[in-house]
Each structure stands twice: as structure tokens, then as C-alpha cells.
Amino acid sequence: MLNHNLVTYHQSEHRLPAGEISDAAKKIINKLVEHNFQAYLVGGAVRDLLLGLHPKDFDIATDATPEDIKHIFKGKCRIIGRRFRLAHVYMGNSLYEVATFRGSDEGDRVMKKGQIIRDNVFGTIDQDAIRRDFSCNALYYDLQEHTILDFAAGVHDLKKGELQLIGNPNKRFVEDPVRMLRAVRFHAKLGLKLTDDMKQIIINNRQHLSNVPTARLFDEAIKLFHCGNMEIAYYTLTELKLLPLLFPQAARIAANEDIWHDFLIQAFRNTDHRLKNGQSVTPVFLTACVMWLEFLPIYHQFINAGKNSHDALHEATTLVMINQRENLMVPKAIQNGVRQMWILQLRFKKMFGKGVYTTLHHPRFRAAYDFLLLRNEVNNDLSQKVEFWTNIQSMSPEGIKSLIFGKKVKRQKVSYDL
């Protein structure tokens, strides 16, 4: 083991709260050690525990191969991935990622234009450490010795409050361009500073994101959406010219029209607030918010061409999703959720009759209602709808019935405005 850069921190020095490590993760590590393998808690969990945060995911690194791990855990393990083969170990209702140390030899590694397409080269712990992206993620916690093994000055960088890439940034960002988005996320989520040099290197290499599968980019976008500080992430993505590579039309519109910039900022603040308060969030909501900027003018184009509001909405939604594929692939389930949220914006116009019950009990009602509130912040013309749909949620069944059937509704001129 080449460990000339290794710094070992003992319990009295690091004070990592080991009691917060999940019992299942400890059980997996102990079982691997019992079978004479090395096994460590690694990466984000160690980093977050040192920062006083409360991680939910506990990743494990080991010198056991995926086949070894599957043999040890038998029916509780499955090997996944072609790009990077690793083991998923199931404990109760939870899943734990157990990865074999990555090596630095050539072996089963496929490169294309400097980007790693496949990498199943296994090695030693110190080789694994220098293959990781940022120094704060190259920290290994030894459960038996209660020590932290630091191969890349990660503890030092955490104390300094800086995010440092391991190795040559120009090479590492080309190997895996998603690291640029991860840098933004760690900056926003953890408050780790991006140096001016790193910012410029990201700007210079941002075009390599076009080489990343669009489905993987969506996964990274959702991680950003739900990092807890998406407002900060948004400003950073804009500064580093990354946002146009993910959502080109939304980026252009928000940059040129203050009303839509403010709309996105409020959407991000609302989600950040929910996360800080332990409330549930869905990737559908912010996806709908960001893509609304492109959707709305297309919808109005269809209306002006003579389409009815229902057809215009569906055709505009489909076109927006097709356009988005070039940069970032939104999964079908999320597309359907976004479409339902937008359909409900039309249904909110009807505030009488049986249709009110259908709208009120729609599975996407809450997200769509929150979206209506958000829209009202940039368009006060929606205040009547907001008042109606806010009040009706706290009314008794008798009160709702009286409200929507108790008086004749004056027929109004049909409006196609959302």
C-alpha cells in the first residue's frame, strides 16, 4: 500500500459521532471484516458527519470484489452497473452501496475523448482514494479502530471551507463532466467555497457536459433541485454558464425577463424551505417550474393559432418535452406528473359543479395548488382562484356542496389564459 500521503486521525482528534452511523451499515462492514476483507465507511457520510450534518446514505468501500460481496451476503445482494460494477446490499427496507476499491492500472477501462466510459479496474485503498473526485470525499472511516484515513488532505480542506478537486482539474472534469455539477451542489449544500481558479476551469470545460447521457444529467439536476440550497445553486449555475446546458430556454428567458427570474427564485426558496422543515418534496414540482418558462409562450402560440385550451396545453407540453431531450432527458413518470400539474392549472378556472370535486381529489392537487400560489406571486390576476382553492380545502363537505351548487353561476366569456 502506497500511503505516503496518508494522514490518520484518531477518535480524540476527529470526534466523528459514530453513533449516527446506521446499524445496518455497521453490520455490513463488520461482516466483510469477519471474512478477512478491508471495509470502510467512505465519502459523503464521513464528510457530512464531520460537518455536523446527518447523512441518510452510508456508502462502503472494500477490497472484496462484487462477486465476493454477493457470496457473503447471498440473497441480500445484487451486482449492478456496467460503467462501474458495484454491489447493492439490502438490509430490511434499506439499500447500501458497497464498492470495490478502484485501481489505477489500465485493465477493464474504456476511454472516449478523455471521458471514462467504463471502469472496472480494482485496486487498493490508496489507489481508490486518488480516483475519487474531491478531497472531502476521499475520507475513510475505520469502524474497528475508530480512525479516519485521509489520503488527500480532505480534513484540512473541510476545516478551510474549500472544495478541492483531486488531481488535474482539466483532466478530471473531462473524465467525468458531471463533477462540475457535483462541485456546484457541494458548494451550495455544504457551503464549501469554489476557488476562482476552479470556477474558470469549469467555465472552460463546461461544453463536455454535452457528452454525458441526458438521463444521467437529469438525475444530477434533481440532486441539485433537492440539495437544500437550490437558490445558491441556481446563481452558481448561472455564473458558471452551466444552466443553459441543462435548461437552455429557461436560462435564456430568466436572464432576459426579471419576472421569470423572480419566479424561479421563489420556486427554489419554497423547496429549500420545505426541505429545511422536513417536508416532502417531489422532482415533479421544480421540473414543472423551470420548464413552465418555455411552455407558456408555446401554449399561447397554439391558442393564437386557433387551438382550444385543452389541445394547446397538451401539444405545448409534448413539444417542450421533445425540445428538452437534446440537453436533458426527463423520465416519462416525471413528464406525466408535470403534464398533470399543468392540466390542473386549467381546471382551477372552473370553480363550480362536480368538476371541483375531481380537481380537489386529484393526486397532484397539492403540488398543482402550490404551483398556483407561486404563479400568483408574479400574476395577481390569479388571486380569485387562489382564494377559492385555498378556502375550499378547509371547508366541511356541506360547505363545499353549498359553495359550488348553492347559487347560479353567471356565465362568463371563455378565457384561454392560464
Image (cartoon, grey):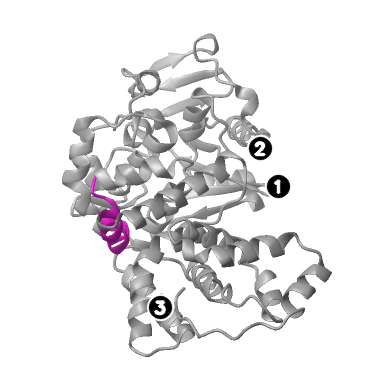
Residue closer to the observer: 55 or 103: 55
| Pointer 2 local density, CA inside 10 Å: few below 14, some 14–19, many at least 20 | some
Tell which tag, 3 or 1, sits nearer the viewer. Answer: 3
Which region shows up in magenta? Answer: 240-255
Q: Would residue 293 be seen by someone viewing this image from the given angle? A: yes
In the rendering, which numbered label is found on residue 318?
3
- Residue under the image location 32 percent in, 32 percent down: 130
In the rendering, which numbered label is found on residue 92?
1
In the rendering, which numbered label is found on residue 24?
2
Residue closer to the observer: 307 or 415: 415
Residue closer to the observer: 296 or 403: 403
2 or 1: tag closer to the N-terminus: 2
Q: Where residue 381 sits in the image (x, y, percent)?
A: 48, 66
- Residue under the image location 64 percent in, 34 percent down: 22
| Pointer 3 local density, CA inside 10 Å: few below 14, some 14–19, many at least 20 | some
2 or 3: tag closer to the N-terminus: 2
Q: Where residue 103 sits in the image (x, y, percent)?
A: 34, 38
| Residue 246 lies within the magenta run | yes
